[in-house]
Amino acid sequence: MPIRENILGCVYIAIGVIGMRRVTNVATKPEYIIAVTFNDGTYGEICLADRLFGPMFEPLKDPVFFAQARVDEFGAVCWPNDADLAPDALYRRIAA
């Protein structure tokens, strides 16, 4: 099982987990903001501007590339270069 660390500082194992919160929709907004909706109806917006560093996330500074965010089969927000954000970490930031 691949272990990953995302830009929110959370380490997670990239497998599907029953009962885990999943992102069902993502939209990008100006200033590197993502708007996410979860499978339980929770909605929130997160600014990632101060987190776009390192080899995986530096390309997201290009607004055209950033706008290519989508939801993968695990309910994570991801981009074409395989950068991704764990749904549980996003949920904690929104619910805090």
Image: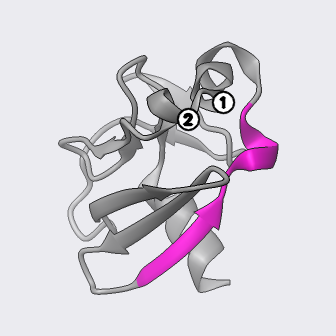
Residue 59 image-quadrant placement? top right
| Residue at (32% x, 73% y) in the render | 38
Residue designated by label 2? 63
For numbered disc 1, what is the local secondary structure?
A: helix
Q: Amino acid at mark 2?
A: Pro
Residue designated by label 1? 61
Where does residue 39 sit, x and y in percent of width and height?
Answer: 24, 75
| Residue at (61% x, 37% y) in the render | 6
Compared across the picture, whether 42 is left or right of 84 comes to left
What span is colored magenta in the figure? 43-52
Where does residue 79 sit, x and y in percent of width and height?
Answer: 39, 31
On screen, residue 85 above or below 34: above
- Crowding at mark 1 (Cα within 10 Å: few <14, some 14-19, many 20+): some
| Residue at (20% x, 63% y) in the render | 18
Q: Amino acid at mark 1?
A: Lys
The C terminus, quarter of image: bottom right
Q: Which mark is residue 29?
A: none
3D distance between C-alphas at marks 2 and 1: 6 Å
Q: How many marks?
A: 2
Where does residue 1 sit, x and y in percent of width and height?
Answer: 35, 24
